[in-house]
Amino acid sequence: MRFFNPNNDSLEDFKGTNKLVTKRYANVQRVEEAEIIGILIGTVVCDNYMSIINQLKRDILKAGKKFYEVLVGKINEPKLKNF
């Protein structure tokens, strides 16, 4: 994968420090290809969480995809395995 470097107006290859960027890109591609998206809600104590979740749901539906919403409270490994 290559990226544009505006400092010297050239295309450069991703190197070791950019592995996170390539992993993120791969994950974004997987979400774009998915037909169903899971929304895992781990806590509801932060402010305006419902408006964020509702916006996420609208965006998913706007993209023509389905979603499952799961509220688990405190997230731990056994709960994630069941999901």
Image (spheres, helix red, strand yellow):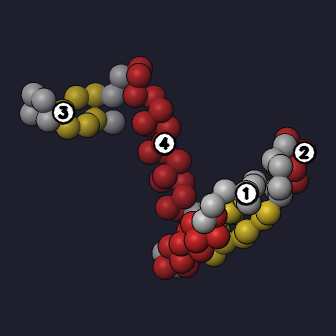
Residue type pointed to by label 1: Val
- Place residue 2 in its image quadrant: top left
Front position among marks 4 and 1? 1
Residue at label 4? 24
Marks 4/3: CA–CA distance: 19 Å
Task: Provide the residue designation for mark 1.
Answer: 45
Earlier sequence position, callout 4 versus callout 3: 3
Q: How far apart are marks 2 and 4 (CA)?
A: 25 Å
Asked whether disc 4 touches disc 3, contact meaning CB atoms under 8 Å apart, the reply is: no
Above or below for 9 versus 62: above
Q: Which of marks 2 and 1 is in front?
A: 1
Q: If you read the primary sequence from the N terminus, does the residue marked by circle 1 or circle 3 appear first?
A: 3
Q: Report the quarter where the N terminus lies.
A: top left
Residues at circles 2 and 1 in contact by the CB criterion of under 8 Å = no
Residue beneath disc 2: 78
Pointer 3 residue = 5
Indicate the amino acid at tag 3.
Asn
Identify the element where label 3 is drawn. Answer: strand
Chain-order first, disc 2 or disc 3: 3
